[in-house]
Amino acid sequence: MKRRLGVSLYPDNSDFNEDKKYLDLAAKYGFSRIFMSMLEVSEGRDEVFRKFKTIIDYAKSLNFEVMLDIAPAIFEALNISYDDLSFFAEVGADGIRLDLGFDGNKEALLSFNPYGLIIELNMSNDVAYLENILSHEANKPFIYGCHNFYPQDGSALPLDFFVSCSQRFKKHGIRTAAFVTSAAGKFGPWDINDGLPTLEMHRYLPLEVQTKHLFATGLIDDVIIGNAYASEEELKAMSAVNRYQLSLAVELVPEVNDVEEEIVLKNQHIRRGDITARMVRSTHVRKIYHEESNSPHDNQQTFQRGDIVIGNDQFGKYKNELQIVLEEHLDERKNKVGRVITEEHILLDYIKPWSKFLFQ
């Protein structure tokens, strides 16, 4: 399933011209979906329609998919029936996200709406919600899943719970989404904004690291910035993330030689299938560079988790094998050539047997 990047808009809390500028930037960097909140509307139906259609029409001109986040109160406030979703189709949305669920049969019926609107479900509950909907013979291609975001510091999901919730959707082949948070973003739907991530561990990490982590889990197809507005620098960094294999940011040591730098940065790395707990071994590079000499340097130290080491001339057949250290150890036959940046150590657990990975 193709993986995508997205942004969030809050038309009831933002300026149309600023929203346009943000969408222009996002489109420039390859973002293709929008989470648009309709939880805070306070005007009449006609004014709400005009405001949302204006920004949605502009988003569609840039080829964004637009999902509207709605709650039962919106249906009441705008005098909309669940049996008639024409308002959302006419305003130009591609789908609606149900912030609150129903009995399963209702969601299944909504997925057969005559407008082809996607019905996006809340993923952040570890219950058989999706299974119930699918058991009512839902129109599965029109069902998406999307996690919540959490504005209050300390209130977002722990990793193990997130994984359990996400697996419920992924095992059925449902398109999934989750939120990351921008350090530059200042607002969302509510008056509290300590960031808007799905995972608590992401709240103060760089945006691109959050993005790498969600894609590395293999459980999320669409990564959406929860708060607005992310900076251009953040959008650019997030757009540069490899969505299909892990690419780790590395800091090289000053003494790294040309051969070592080439081994690290110019090769497709593959973790050996018969793994060890001590390190990730990329063994095929030693065959490519078996004739290249590699004098010892930076080898008189205890290697720490995240260090990148390469076998030196003292290491026989293992000369020029690359390893990422997982457990600290000392081995003078290896040169430390760099380290995975500290913020990305959380990604090391996702290098599985036969995993493909890169360094940048």
Image (spheres, rainbow, N blue to C red):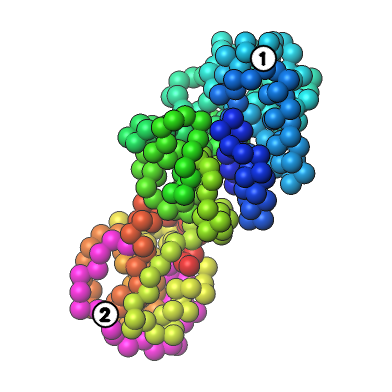
| Callout 2 amino acid | Asp
Above-or-below relation of 173 to 350: above
Q: Main secondary structure of the magenta part?
A: loop
- The local crowd at label 2, few if under 14, some if 14 to 19, many if 20 or more residues have their Cα within 10 Å, is some
| Callout 1 amino acid | Leu
Q: Where residue 278 sits: x, y (%)?
A: 28, 60
Q: Give the range drawn in magenta.
A: 282-306
Please tell me the numbered disc located at residue 298.
Answer: 2
Q: Confirm whether residue 163 shows in the render.
A: no
Above-or-below relation of 271 to 125: below
The answer to whether residue 323 is left or right of residue 170 is: left
Q: Which residue is drawn at 61% across and 33% down?
A: 11
Secondary structure at badge 2 equals: loop
Residue 37 lies within the magenta run:
no
Give the label, 2 or 1, closer to the camera.
1
The answer to whether residue 92 is left or right of residue 241 is: right
Q: Where residue 163 sits: x, y (%)?
A: 43, 36
The answer to whether residue 217 is left or right of residue 348 is: right
